[in-house]
Image: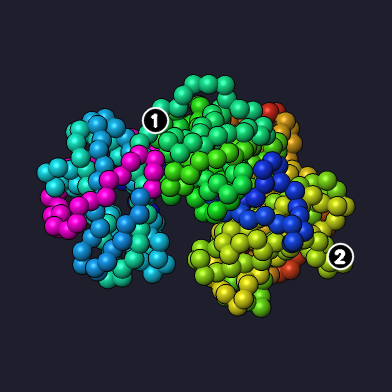
Amino acid sequence: MANLSCSATGGETVIIADAATTPTAVATDQASEPTPSEPATAVPTAVPEPTATPVPATEAPERLVGGETTRGTITDAVEPVLFEFVAEAGDTFALTVEPLDQDLDVVVDVVDSRRQSIFGGDVDDSFFTEFVDGIVVEESGVYTVIVSSYDDNIGDVAVTVDFAVAVALGQPVRFGQATPIEVTASGVAQITFVADEGEWIDITVVPVDDLDVVVDVRNSDGVSFLENGPVDRSFGTERIRVLEMPADGLYSVVVSGYEGASGFAEAVVERSLAGSGTFLRGSDVIDDPEEPQEFPFTAFAGDVVRLIVQPDSPDHDVVVLVIEAETGDVLYEVDATTGLEELVIEVPQDGDYYFQVWSFDDSVGSFDFVLLAPETAVLELASNDQLIGRTGNATSLQYIIQPPNSGTLTIAVDAIDEMEVTLALFDAGEDRVIDAEGTDDGRQIVTYEVAADVIYVIDVATGIGGGAFELDITVE
């Protein structure tokens, strides 16, 4: 992935999941197919000083049309495949080059009519899809895209150039509102919504019949801020989850048909977590297919808790279960795709539960996860966990930790919003062993010597108005 003129928002997690509206848990044979994505903030910038790049004499370049995908083939390990497009001075564009063969790693450059690179040299920031966004054209003319093989493999590639178009002002959709859209062969469908800086947003686009859709999210300047570019990870529903909005303003969901396909779809924009609650985000690894990773929690009847898992490798397939701790009964199981999985449960009764993540078919590897829970649920944390909590008016969030070994527990809390944060720690006897009053800067760091296999309760309280905070935990 290349992002020559983008600045990542840092710590963002983008996940694609399954649901046309607010999701609910479904049994395995009812699970629908989810897909992933990751977010970042893009701003147009002037391109780097150009450098000379030789363009080999090959067949005439394929012509690219904005918003459409064109295929080409690298038939020789030392000869690139060429594409070209026309751009006007001041245009802002994004380029996506996707290898269609799993073993093909590509190198990408774009040169002007003088054969000078407008990227400042070759781009190879990914082992798969290369994406360059927010590039501003300085001179009108014809530009050539050069796609070559990095590792002497050959194969097919799909190339798309998208030009930024300012968001058309219209009636923004309401959160949770299902909006029918029509995608034509010559254009795109677009809906707009208003969001505040720091809000987390879910987007779902459900095509009708056999339409294969491509989904992008753009700011008011028409610039995409999806780090890996427009999303097309399935032949059906496309989903973007937990997308952090970079600023207050108007945004657009832009939907096109793959390779000019036309048809109808339905789009829904929702808040990832309505009200107070917790986003627990991190990475984990399964190095033994017989040993799952677990995510315990305590919840009340009616609480909606969600776990989203994204394997880091296409060769790593996972299965997600939710289990009632007291009985050991598996309530739901999801293995909808060979990639991302999402399981959402409406808790049937008060009690203790846990998610399990298993490898499928002896595959092993690492994965990213997001666990979302309302303020009434209590998550069990582990060392090195990082989370974002959001409280309501004069409320608190509680978490538990049961260290497998004795050591020094360090808890760091940073207020995201302007507010006072009070931090407390209770031991197994419900004695308050730490009571840290709020500070002017909203930051708290406390330590405590913990014993092995003892349950401790962490309580984070905020004052009037509530707000968001970050919480980091380590045990050493």
Q: Which mark is residue 326?
A: 2
Type of secondary structure dominating the magenta stretch: loop
Residue 110 vs 59, above or below: the answer is above
Residue type indicated by callout 1: Val
Quarter-of-image position of residue 154: bottom left
> First in sequence: mark 1 or mark 2?
1
Residue density around tag 1, few if under 14, some if 14–19, many if 20 or more, within 10 Å: some
Residue type indicated by callout 2: Glu
Query: Does 12 sit left or right of 475 as displayed?
Result: left
Residue 13 position, x and y percent, is 53, 49
- Residue shown at 74%/36% (left/top)? 395
Is residue 472 visible in the rendered structure shown here? Answer: no
Tell me the mark number nearer the camera, choosing from 1 and 2.
Answer: 1
- Which region is colored magenta? 42-69
Closest to the observer, 117 or 392: 117
Residue 104 position, x and y percent, is 35, 66
Quarter-of-image position of residue 1: bottom left
Residue density around tag 2, few if under 14, some if 14–19, many if 20 or more, within 10 Å: few
Residue 472 position, x and y percent, is 58, 52
